[in-house]
Image (spheres, rainbow, N blue to C red):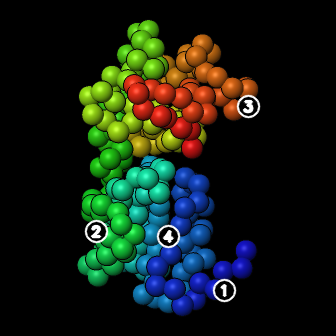
Amino acid sequence: DDLSGFGPVDMVIEAVSEDLELKQKLLKEIEARTTESCIFASNTSSLPITPTAAASARPETVLGMHFFSPVHKMPLLEIIVTDKPADEVTATAVAYGKRLGKQTIVVSDGVGFYTSRILAPYMSEAAMVLAEGAAIEAIDRALLDFGFPVGPIALMECSAGPGRCEQETICAVRDPWQRINQAILETLRHVTLRELVGPPQEQFLYQESTEIGGRHVERN
């Protein structure tokens, strides 16, 4: 692809697949076509930033910007920093996030960053309750009634279905939550057999839209 138009830009936010080699390759291509001060921000929910930045000729300009799905509805933005980025690089990313209207937080690089790390026990508990026989709708309704903006099973749908959810969860919680993570994956495999709807090539836990706990839930 032609990246020649990237020359004068101040910041590039990539959102390619969660593949380290692909992100490193893109990083090198962008750096070859931009100025030394251009910030490279990786939009990732599961890959630590340090390995991506290791491929950079100027790691002080590399950080993470984790947007949440669906981006136009979710206000939170994680700025993920290693020990390399210059202060002005972090400040620029935060300022840009605020210009987008995001509630911006800065977190250190690490497995799961902040949100995925605290999300792991929440999602794993939902998976365990589901494995014990609770209905999908009942689980989500309970959490909606408690005050959560979306239930845990509907949240899985925001990642476009169980397949992607499995992949991202196992990356995000790789080490601290390995045992719990296995429970999530095993539960979802059983759910696939007994409760998913839709054709085999595109099965989802919910229909295109439904009412859960008095609230309208749509699959993205």
Q: Residue flagged by tag 1: what amino acid is it?
A: Ser
Q: Earlier in the sequence, mark 2 or mark 4?
A: 4
**Picture coordinates of residue 147, whole percent (x, y):** 27, 34
Disc with the residue nearer the chain's start (3 vs 2): 2
Gap in angstroms between the C-alphas marked 1 and 3: 38 Å
Q: Earlier in the sequence, mark 4 or mark 1?
A: 1
| Amino acid under disc 3 | Gln
Residue that badge 4 annotates? 13
Task: Give me the residue at 73% from left, 26% from top.
Answer: 199
User: Pointer 4 and pointer 3: residues touching (CB < 8 Å)?
Assistant: no
Instruction: Identify which amino acid the numbered label 2 is placed on.
Output: Asp
Q: CA distance from mark 2 to mark 4?
A: 20 Å
Q: Please tell me which residue lies in front, 25 or 65.
A: 65
Image vertical order of residue 191 relative to residue 89, above or below: above
Looking at the picture, which amino acid does disc 4 mark?
A: Ile
Q: Position of residue 81 (x, y in %)?
A: 32, 65
Residue in view at x 69 percent, y 26 percent: 198
Q: Which marked residue is nearer to the observer: mark 3 or mark 2?
A: 3
Image quadrant holding the N terminus, namely bottom right
Q: Which mark is residue 4?
A: 1
Q: Are marks 4 and 1 in contact (CB under 8 Å)?
A: no
How far is the residue under mark 3 from the one under mark 2?
43 Å
Residue at the spot of label 2: 83
Q: CA distance from mark 4 to mark 1?
A: 16 Å
Of pointers 4 and 3, the one earlier in the residue sequence:
4
Residue 125 visible? The answer is no
Check whether the beta carbons of the residues at disc 2 and disc 1 lie within 8 A of each other: no
Q: Distance between the Cα atoms at labels 4 and 3?
A: 31 Å
User: Which residue in the protein does label 3 denote?
Assistant: 201
